[in-house]
Image: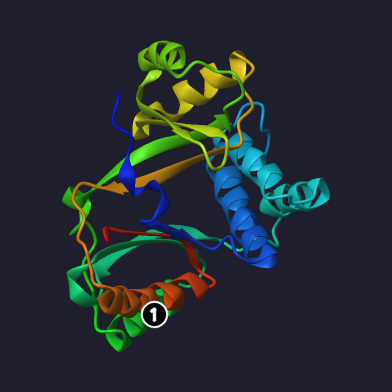
Amino acid sequence: MGRAYEYRKARKFKRWGMMAKTFTKIGKDIALAVKSGGPDPTTNGRLRAIIQNARAANMPKENVDRAIKRAVSKEQEDYKEITYEGYGPHGIAIVVETATDNINRTVANLRSYFSKCGGALGTSGMLDFMFDRKSVFRIPAGNIDLDELELEMIDFGADEISLDEEAEQIVIYGEFTAFGAIQKHLEEKGYELKQAEFERIPNDTKELTEEESADLEKLLEKIEEDEDVLNVFHNMR
């Protein structure tokens, strides 16, 4: 597990730039987690991880509590998790994760963005072979020995551990199905979880010129601004 994934800084775009958008995304994540596993974070690992992410994003506790209460009330919109796939300009593969209460609106918007920016929305599953879904955890680096942590975590499904020196964090990658086991072990060992989520890692990347990259950025910006979009992944180098 000596090679760190090179994609992590450049290949995933998220709507974390504005506080309001961040809180909106987390609110939807909470609604989906409560729907699938209930409102008690002690028994709902997914919800527990989202609450940790909310803390890392400085989302007030009262906002989190309100989102959980809303998720179990009749006022909550019935969000559906839907993934869309397509090709952007210059043949870049793009995967868009959404949470929507109006599928027709979401697909129409995304099709319009792709079309106007020289791309095309495709069919579900067409890009499965190009991306691996991974569980990703971030913990403070502190004085942790990477080699020892690597040996410790491999039995719980971790397959890559790297140091993000800029953020002073250790990033732990694992199989998609290992999320619960890794999360449980880190919590039991007392590691502080700064973030826990799923990411889509491209198996192959494509390098673009500066001008071509600008074309892609226009499309990604439009997608990111859509209120139904949660995450966007692509394979531009």
Tell me: residue 54, above or below residue 175. Answer: below
Tell me: residue 102, above or below residue 38. Answer: below
- The amino acid type of the residue labelled 1 equals Lys
Asked if residue 38 shows in the view, the reply is no
Tell me: residue 136, above or below residue 57. Answer: above
Q: Which residue appears at 28% of the width and 79% of the height?
A: 211
| Percent of width and height locating residue 187 | 60, 20
Q: Which residue appears at 49% of the width and 41% of the height?
A: 197
| Percent of width and height locating residue 158 | 37, 23
Tell me: residue 33, above or below residue 169. Answer: below
Q: Residue furthest right?
A: 62
User: For mark 1, what is the residue?
Assistant: 218
Task: Say left or right for 20 vs 97.
Answer: right
Q: Which residue appears at 66% of the width and 33% of the height?
A: 41
Color scheme of the displayed model? rainbow
Q: Which residue appears at 53% of the width and 60% of the height?
A: 79
Image quadrant occupied by the C terminus: bottom left
What secondary structure is found at the residue carrying circle 1?
Answer: helix
In front of the other: 19 or 3: 3
| Percent of width and height locating residue 31 | 61, 52
Image quadrant occupied by the N terminus: top left
Q: How many marks?
A: 1
Task: Say left or right for 119 vs 74.
Answer: left
| Percent of width and height locating residue 3 | 29, 31
In front of the other: 162 or 12: 162
